[in-house]
Every structure is written in structure tokens, then in C-alpha cells.
Amino acid sequence: MKCNKYNSFSGLILLFLFISEIASAQVKDSVINFIFTSDVHFGLTKDQFRGKAAVPAKEVDMAMMQVMNQLVAKEPKVAGIDALIITGDIANRMENGVQSAKASWKQFEEVFIDSNHLRKANGTKSALWVMPGNHDMSNAIGFHRPMVPKKDPASMIGIYNLMFPEKQVVSFDSSLNRIHYSRDMKGVHFIFLSLYPDSAERVWMEYDLKNINPATPVLLFAHSIPDVEPRFFENPNGLHDINEQDKFENLVPERYKDGKDVKGETVIEQNGFADFLIKHKNIKAYFHGHENWTEYYQYKGPKNNLNLTCIRTDSPMKGRISLKDENKLAFELVTINTNSGLLTVKEVLWNANPNSDQIKWGLINSFNLK
């Protein structure tokens, strides 16, 4: 029986296309893309932005969200965005006439939920993973300087309900409503912390990591810098309260051990975290905001016995560099090839040309998670 050359050739083409589709699907399945930003500070105004003065955070953050929405179209190597991650300071602290946390949370929803059109490679909606910052927590529990109102937990309640839809709350208790959680994606374990990996968070992380394979790479996300400030801890003095004299903010439940003053060191506190990192060697990176500029660096710890990769990101409202030069406004695009273990982080200069919708790449760094 003679073979039909046309049918054979067509069959080879179909087979090639089928294999190509499988290979393409495998490549997509082995790649994670997420956007990372922090310190969106609804309630603040920006002195200058795109030719206008005193621009409210809602307008600036909306401009950033619109660029994020267009990122896949502008970067052909990015098939989709798996998640948008925001590490806190959703609402600015309610000092000096800043609006309530309730008003700020409503604006956050309008920008990062209602106007968020990010999609994964398969077309489904991208995940939104949010954590609190020190401003969010202070609004909820009080501060040592006057605020109006004195307390408003709206952004803490909003974050909690967003991340735990099955546990909806109408009031906030910082000891009960801990905002920490983890997610698994394509062989990578993501841990999201409440402000800083203090002793209480480390107890929870031990439990969380108990069933995680030691070979699984783990990424930590928190608001605070790893070399945490004393003021984050519980007041070691008197009634251990928040007061104008001591200036401790009681943001985490661990009591400060290095002294009695917020101007001291955090050697004891950091050593506790360092010991945890040494025990869990699969923790490969720490992502944070709080200090508001792009930097990729190594955290060595107080004893200089660590080499933890840290990714610090800019703030659209309080950037140390971008506040003076809006062309330096940035967020981070992180890509992980789970087959090779290579993580690449790119600084996206989203306002490099305010008169154009073209993005520009800034800093780029890669390291291996294996």
C-alpha cells in the first residue's frame, strides 16, 4: 500500500505543532512572574507628578496600576502575571490632617482591586497578596502622637478580610487577627508576614514550614527591613504601653530586649531571626518595603554569618529617590524559572517618560534558589 505524501507531511506538521504546544505549556508551567511593590500610602499627596502639584495618592497609584495592567503587552517575554504583591503601608498614618484609614482603604479597593486587570498566562485573574505596614497597624492600635480619629482599623480589617475571605471580621484585635499566611506556587513556597519576623511570627513560621520539603525554596515578604528598628517592638518600660515619652509603637508582640530606648540597637531581636534562617536554609530571599528605594542586597545579620538576598522596593508616594525625581518611580518584576531555579528581578521604571506609556528597565539582578 502506497503512502500519501501529502497526508504524511500534514501529519508531521500536526505532530510538530502538538509537541510545540506541549513544550510551550511546560515552559509556562515552569515560570512564575509576579509584581512587587510597597508603601502606596493612600492619604498622602505628592508635591509634583506629571506636571501637576499636590497630587493625591489615589491618582499616583492609579497611574502605576495602569502601567502594571499593560506590562504583559509591553514585555513579550512575560506570558502573564501570577500575582501582585504589596508589602504594606496601604493607608498613611492619620496625622496632620491625613484622611481616615477607612477613606484610604476605599481608595485602595478602587485602585488595586476594581482597576486591577492583571491576568495569569492561562487567562485567569492574578492573585493579589497584601500585608500590613507600620502605618496600618498604628492607625488600628493608636500612636504616640495625635491622630484624628485616635484609632481606625479599617485598612487592617480590609487586608484581613481580603486575605482571609472565609474569616470575615468587623472589628480588629491585633493579638487575635494576625495577618500572616503562606501560598504555594509551582514548587515555590511564599510566606507573608505581619510587619517583621519577630519571635511570635517565627513560632507560626515553624508550624507553617513543618510540612514543607527542605528542598523547596521559600521566599519571605514583610514590611520591615531585616535590620528592624527598635520602635517596632513592645515597650519594655512601665506599663508597656504606647506613650509620647517612650515612643515605642508596639507593632509586634515581642517585647524589646536590647535596652529601654527606641534609639538603641536590635542585636538580640535580629539574632533570633538569624538563628531561624540558619536552621531553615531553604529560605532564599526576603522582600520588603519601608525604606522606599530599589535595592538588591545581602543581609549579613549581626554576627556577619548570613548571606540572605534582600529585595527592597520603591514607594510611589515616599520614594527616597523618586520623590525628587519622578522618572525614577519604580516597582519590581520578578521572574522565577522553577526548572533551573533562577530568580530574576527587574526594576520597572514605570514613569521614566511621563508623556509616554513606554516603560524602561532599571536595575536587574539574578540569583539561584537551589
Image (cartoon, rainbow, N blue to C red):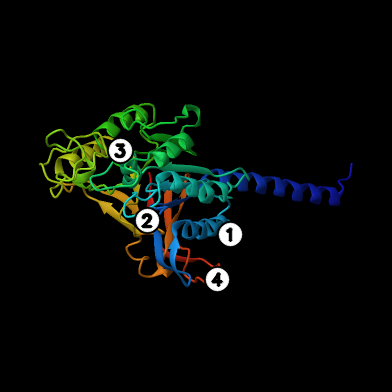
Q: Residues within 10 Å of mark 1 (few under 14, many from 20)?
A: few
Q: Is residue 52 left or right of residue 226?
A: right
Determine whether, in the image, residue 56 is placed left or right of residue 16: left
Tag 4: amino acid: Ser
Q: Which residue is at a point 47% across and 60% down the rendered structure image?
A: 60
Front-most of residues 91 and 72 = 91
Dot label at residue 148 = none
Residue on which the image places disc 1: 76
Q: Residue at x 57, y 58 (%)?
A: 70
Tell me residue 253's x, y (percent): 25, 34
CB within 8 Å, label 3 to label 1 = no
Give the mark nearest the N terminus, 3 or 2. Answer: 3
Disc with the residue nearer the chain's start (4 vs 2): 2
Q: Compared with residue 104, is residue 60 higher up or lower down, i.e. above or below?
A: below
**Residue 188 visible in image:** no
Secondary element type, mark 1: loop
Which secondary structure, mark 4? loop
Counting from the top left corner in percent of width and height, residue 348 is at 46, 61
Q: Residue furthest right?
A: 1
Q: Residue at x 34, y 49 (%)?
A: 94
Q: Which residue is mark 2?
A: 313
User: Disc 1 or 2, which lies upstream in sequence?
Assistant: 1
Badge 2: residue crowd in 10 Å (few <14, some 14–19, many ≥20) = many
Q: CA distance from mark 4 to mark 2?
A: 23 Å
The disc placed on residue 141 is 3
Q: Residues within 10 Å of mark 3 (few under 14, many from 20)?
A: some
